[in-house]
Image (spheres, rainbow, N blue to C red):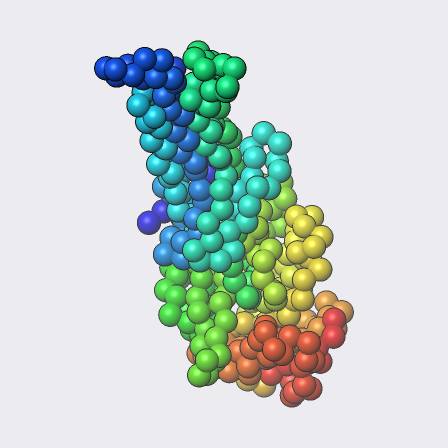
Amino acid sequence: MKFIDEALIDVAAGNGGAGCVSFRREKFIPFGGPNGGDGGRGGSVWAVADQNINTLIDYRYTRRHEARNGEPGRGSDQFGAAGPDIDLRMPVGTIVSDAETGEVMVELLEHGQRVLIAKGGDGGFGNLHFKTSTNRSPRQKTPGWPGQAFKLKLELRVLADVGLLGMPNAGKSTLIAAVSNARPKIADYPFTTLHPNLGVVRVGPERSFVVADVPGLIEGASEGAGLGHQFLRHLQRTRLLLHIVDAAPFDEGVDPVVQARAIVAELKKYDPALHAKPRWLVFNKLDMVPEAEREKRVKDYVRRLRWKGPVFSISALARDGLQPLLEAIWKHVAPDQRSQALPDVRFGDAAEAAE
């Protein structure tokens, strides 16, 4: 299924039905009085969060969503039927905002959450409502009220605990495939990942967290280079960012330190709040570096980056060094352990936790 994370739609609630002017016309009952019923309420439009949906593709091609109008009132004290409501099922993590004003109307953060986004109009009053002791044959009625209508912008931001950040071909997709059941496309050319991938990582019994892999960034992304900043919104709800660095680039002229600095600069240009999130440095592809040089090379990168935060060295392909990384992540994102500091561990597992 094609991944769509943005859509513009028009929604319109139903109008209320008009009230009715009617009088009793029964044999042997003179001056029977008014019996015109009220109009029915128009149908409303609701947004419903559904964890079984992971894309907004349904709203890319079906842009107009209208609820039915309420029925008009009738004689014999008959009120009009209300128009049925319609539910727009959306992925968990969808932000619904007014496309014209930019105001956020609702964020769908829990499965089953149901929120009213366009209220149906109330039905009009029939002449039955206007009967008084001095006005025994009223001929007044009111039309139904119009339903609300909006032009909406839908924006999906995936819900994940950990986000993977890095240059194309840094090994992000290989990492998420190694630690979870996610099976993203993996190949030896840049921009293999074209849309976010989610994977559930199980560290142990009742210990798991969700990882999001987004397409890689390159220098100049803020000006639209590569895939630009198109998918960085999916990292805004994460608790932790893993900055994946290729410790053994195929091209000898490529400096991982320069690339890492470029990623940080693009992150800051996109959103200072995202840049301020906790971020750990993960050097990948250590299996391609001679074992005697691994520690020296990583220490050199850390020194040149002036990095003071946690550092991990792994090989996602060989699945080397992953368990210490996963245990440290779990201690960071676990709801009852978020405030605990990481313990000091040996080089290659993690450094101290303060950045």
Question: Looking at the figure, which quarter contains the C terminus?
Answer: bottom right
Q: Could you say which is closer to the camera, residue 100 or residue 209?
A: 100
Pick out the residue farthest to the left.
Answer: 27
Q: 111 above or below 200?
A: above
Where does the image place residue 145, in percent across and percent down from the top left?
48, 23
Residue at x-position 40% and y-position 54%: 50
Q: Could you say which is closer to the camera, residue 106 or residue 63?
A: 106
Pick out the residue farthest to the front.
Answer: 28
Q: 71 above or below 303?
A: above
Q: Residue 127 vs residue 77: left or right?
A: right
Residue at x-position 32% and y-position 13%: 30
Where does the image place residue 71, in percent across and percent down from the top left?
34, 25
Q: Residue 353 vs residue 119: left or right?
A: right
Residue at x-position 55% and y-position 66%: 162
Q: 332 above or below 257?
A: below
Q: Is residue 194 visible?
A: no
